[in-house]
Image (cartoon, rainbow, N blue to C red):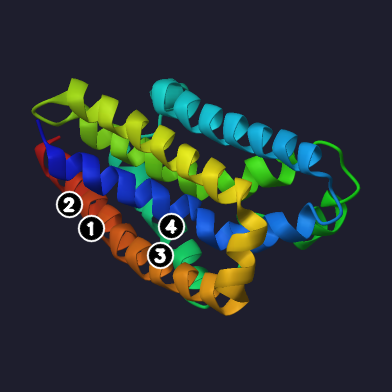
Amino acid sequence: MDLAFAITAFAAIFAIMNPPGNIPVFVAITEGYTTEQKNRVIRKVCIVAGGILIIFGLFGNLIFDLYGITIPAFKIAGGALLFSIAFTMTKGQLTKSKMTTEEEEEATEKEEVGVVPLGIPLFAGPGAITTVMIYVSYAQNSSDPVFDFISIFIGIIVTVAISFVMLKYADPLFKRMGRSGTMAFTRIMGLLLAAMAVEFMLSGTFEAVSNYWTA
C-alpha cells in the first residue's frame, strides 16, 4: 500500500481542478440565479466533472491503443500542457485551456452552465484529464496497482466533494477571501502544479530514452 502515491495523486488532482480559484468564476456566472438554480448548477458541475475524469481514468488506455500513443510520449506532452497551465496560474489568471473568453461571455445566456463551461472545461479541463491519465499510467506500473487505481478515483471523488461544498458556500467564501485571496491560492496551486509537470516530463523523457535503447 503506497500512501504517498495516494496523497500525491489527490494533491495533483486538487491543484489542477483548483476549486477555490474557480469560486469567482462560479459567482460571476451564476449572479442573479436563485438558490435552487445555483444548487442545480452545482450538482451538474460535480456530476459532469467527476464523471468525465472517472471515464478517462477507466478507459483512457483504450484511446492510447486506438491512436498508438505511448505512455512516455503522453507524459511529456501532458507535462508540457500542465506546465503551461501552471505558469498561467502563477500569474493568478484563468487559463485559456480551461475556459475561453467567448465561453465566459456566453455562459450567462445558457441554462446548462453547470455542464459548459463550468463542468467542462473549467473543472474537468484538459489539464485535469491529463493529470488523471498520467497517474493511471503510474498505477499500472506500481507494485500495488489495485490500491493505486482506487486511490486515484478516491482522489477524484474527494476533490469533487470539496468542490461541491465550496460552490455551495461560494458567495460567503468569495466575500471572505476576496479576489486577491483566491488569486493568491491559485498562484500557490500553480507553483505546485509546475513542479509536478516538470516531474512528468522528466519521467517521460527517461522512459522514452530507456525504451529507445532497449528496443
Q: Dot 1 corresponds to which residue?
A: 202
Disc 4 residue crowd, few under 14, some 14–19, many 20+, Cα 10 Å: many
Q: Do the residues labelled 1 and 4 touch (CB within 8 Å)?
A: no
Give SS at disc 2.
helix
User: Left of 101 or right of it: where is 47?
Assistant: left
Q: How far apart are marks 1 and 3 (CA)?
A: 20 Å
Identified at 23% across, 45% down, the residue is 7
Q: In front of the other: label 1 or label 4?
A: 4
Q: In front of the other: label 3 or label 2?
A: 3
Q: Are marks 2 and 1 in contact (CB under 8 Å)?
A: yes
- Earlier along the polypeptide chain: callout 4 or callout 3? 4
Disc 1 residue crowd, few under 14, some 14–19, many 20+, Cα 10 Å: some
Question: Where does the image place residue 154, in percent across and percent down from the top left?
Answer: 34, 31
- Earlier along the polypeptide chain: callout 2 or callout 4? 4
Q: In front of the other: label 2 or label 4?
A: 4
**115, 160: nearer the viewer:** 160
Q: Dot 4 corresponds to which residue?
A: 82
Q: Dot 3 corresponds to which residue?
A: 189
Q: How far apart are marks 3 and 2 (CA)?
A: 26 Å
Give SS at disc 3.
helix
Q: In front of the other: label 2 or label 1?
A: 1
Q: In the image, what residue type sits under mark 1? A: Leu
- The quarter in which the N terminus is drawn is top left
- Earlier along the polypeptide chain: callout 1 or callout 4? 4
Q: Dot 2 corresponds to which residue?
A: 206
Question: Where does the image place residue 101, in percent across and percent down from the top left?
Answer: 77, 62
- Earlier along the polypeptide chain: callout 1 or callout 3? 3
User: Left of 46 or right of it: where is 199?
Assistant: left
Task: Determine whether 193 is above or below 12 in the image.
Answer: below
Any part of residue 96 in sight: no
Any part of residue 56 in sight: yes
